[in-house]
Image (cartoon, rainbow, N blue to C red):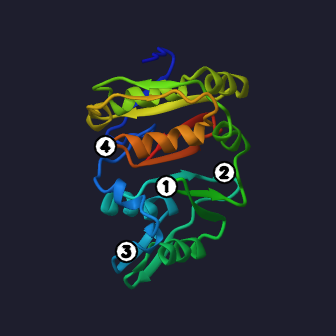
């Protein structure tokens, strides 16, 4: 596993993990079925939640793999979503959520629900996600933090972050050091960062990735739940 002593680490008093934290929920294999968008989502009331918080319900309760690229908060501050929804299928659920925050759109791609901004998109985030990256090996027993550290220190990503004057950021908690318990090798030569993150959520015990800018001057890149 690659290591980088320069990666910024912050201990948060409430233990929030802000860079590459994934939930451990069974059921991903079922979501790969052809009728996955017909999965029934329970009736619920959503109050004052941002779009990534709402979509986390799909991860925590249904094990549905999700990848989210958040917009530039300086241009488009996060909106609070309030919804009362009956039981419905996944497609209608996603459409209902997006209708409340139409800055975003969604698409099911290769088994992962992708959500990204159609306005206020951060150029650096979009560039990073489309960057082809080197192969990545996840060692047996690696922690979620170690996976984050390796992904953000892939040479192609590290070079772009350095050129942009941006750093990765992580808040450590006990959960971030949870061991995955399974080795994995992603050695395709043409994987983009987005495709790599998708493969990680589909082929390990992780279910989600969320990428965003962080900091007063957007000086950090964060991958988070």
Specify which label sits upstream in the sequence, 1 or 4: 4
Spatial distance from mark 2 to mark 3, Cα to Cα? 29 Å
Report, in whole angstroms, how far the alpha carbon at label 1 lies from the one at label 2. Answer: 26 Å
Q: Which residue is mark 2?
A: 72
Front-lying residue, 70 or 144: 144
Q: Give how far across and how far down residue 76 sits, in percent.
A: 67, 59
Mark earlier in primary sequence (2, 3): 3
* Residue highlighted by disc 3: 41
Of badges 1 and 4, the one in the foreground is 1
Comparing marks 2 and 3, which lies closer to the viewer?
Answer: 3
Identify the residue at horizontal 59%, vertical 63% (top origin): 106
Instruction: Please give left or right for residue 115 compared with residue 40 in the image.
Output: right
How far across and how far down the image is residue 115, in percent?
A: 58, 58
Tags 3 and 1 touching, CB below 8 Å = no
Q: Nearer the viewer, residue 218 or 71?
A: 71
- Mark 2 lies on a secondary structure that is loop
On the image, numbered disc 1 is attached to which residue? 111
In the picture shown, does residue 41 fall above or below 150? below
Give the residue at x 37% y 82%: 87
In the rendered view, does 13 fall on the left or right side of 89? left
Label located before the other in sequence (4 or 3): 4
Residue 139 placement (x, y as % from top left): 35, 23
Where residue 100 sits in the image (x, y, percent)? 57, 75
Label 4 to label 3: alpha-carbon separation: 30 Å
Label 1 residue SS: loop
Residue where numbered disc 4 is placed = 14
Q: Is residue 67 above or below residue 159?
A: below
SS at badge 4: loop
């Amino acid at each position: 596993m690659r290591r980088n002593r320069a990666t910024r680490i912050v201990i948060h008093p409430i233990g929030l993990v802000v860079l590459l934290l994934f939930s451990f929920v069974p059921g991903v294999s079922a979501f790969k079925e052809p009728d996955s968008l017909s999965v029934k989502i329970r009736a619920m009331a959503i109050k004052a939640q941002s779009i990534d918080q709402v979509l986390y319900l799909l991860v925590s309760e249904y094990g549905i793999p999700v990848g989210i690229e958040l917009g530039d908060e300086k241009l488009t501050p996060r909106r609070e979503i309030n919804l009362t929804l009956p039981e419905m299928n996944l497609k209608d659920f996603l459409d209902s959520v997006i209708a409340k925050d139409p800055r975003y759109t969604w698409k099911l791609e290769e088994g992962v629900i992708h959500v990204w901004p159609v306005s206020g998109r951060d150029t650096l985030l979009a560039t990073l996600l489309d960057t082809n990256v080197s192969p990545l090996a996840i060692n047996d027993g690696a922690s979620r933090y170690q996976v984050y550290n390796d992904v953000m220190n892939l040479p192609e990503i590290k070079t772009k972050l350095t050129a942009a004057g941006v750093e990765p950021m992580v808040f450590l908690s006990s959960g971030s050091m949870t061991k995955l318990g399974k080795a994995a090798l992603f050695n395709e030569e043409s994987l983009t960062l987005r495709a790599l993150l998708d493969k990680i959520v589909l082929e390990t015990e992780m279910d989600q990735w969320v990428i965003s800018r962080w900091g007063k001057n957007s000086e950090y890149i964060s991958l988070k739940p």
